[in-house]
Image: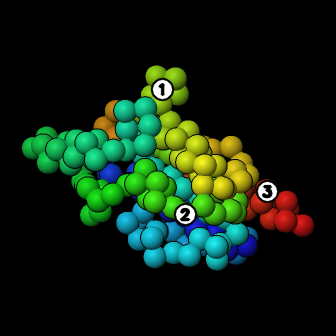
Amino acid sequence: MRTLVVYESMFGNTRHVAEAIARGLESAGPVTAVPVTRAGDEDLSGYDLVMVGGPTHVHGMSRESTRRGAAVTAQKPDSTVTLEPDAESEGLREWLDGLPPTHGKAVAFDTRANGPALLTGRASKGICRKLRLHGFDLVADSESFLVDKESRLEDGEETRAEQWGRTLARQVTSSHA
């Protein structure tokens, strides 16, 4: 099974989660993990599974204004976060909007503040909607990985992401059989 993991990351959390998911998926075959800024170079039809994830901003996927806000946060003198190199470029929302109609299997994930999803929102909800709109079949429920008040991944989330990747690898490959 060939898998593409596309991610958007502001402060590195979603990148770390995407890389951990990719490690978990490797048991089922080759995995390519790319930031959304490089996803346009990929031929999605060459993959058996496309995973898409990003940070939750204002209850959903990032927008240009929220990416600018993340940059401002990272530049504050007392900031504990560092902005990812491509953080101010186009994000998942723009990439997904530009996809042609397609087909294939997909799964979404996100990072979000630790709290009830009703209060924090989930970027994966919008990602799922856009993936379905473009013709993807969602083969598993989306998953959220939690960050703390300082915008750092909660303890154990990378391990949980890798385990989720292994679980998805078994789930998706058994559905191929």
Q: Is residue 78 left or right of residue 115?
A: left
Label 3: how many residues lie within 10 Å, few (<14), some (14-19) or many (20+)?
few
Dot 3 falls on a residue whose secondary structure is helix
Q: Image quarter for residue 169?
A: bottom right
Q: Disc 1 versus disc 3: distance between alpha carbons? A: 28 Å
Of the residues under marks 2 and 3, which one precedes in the sequence?
2
* Residue drawn at point x = 46 percent, y = 68 percent: 39
Circle 2/circle 1 CB separation < 8 Å: no
Q: Residue furthest left?
A: 77
Question: What kind of residue is marked 1?
Answer: Gly
Q: Earlier in the sequence, mark 2 or mark 1?
A: 2
Q: Residues within 10 Å of mark 2 (few under 14, many from 20)?
A: few
* x, y percent for residue 42: 51, 75
Which residue is found at the position 43% from the left and 50% from the top? Answer: 93
Are there few (<14), some (14-19), or many (20+) residues within 10 Å of tag 1?
few
Q: Quadrant of the N terminus?
A: bottom right
The mark lying in front, picked from 2 and 3, is 2
Camera-side residue: 156 or 127?
Answer: 127
Identify the residue under disc 1: 115
The quarter of the picture where residue 129 lies is: top right
The residue carrying mark 3 is 171
**Residue 112 visible in image:** no
Indicate the colouring scheme.
rainbow
Q: Is residue 25 left or right of residue 9?
A: right
Horizontal and vertical percent position of residue 115: 48, 26
Q: Give the position of the C terminus as an image quadrant.
A: bottom right
Q: Is residue 146 above or below residue 160?
A: above
Q: x, y percentage for residue 147?
A: 42, 39
Q: Amino acid at mark 3?
A: Gln
Residue beneath disc 2: 100
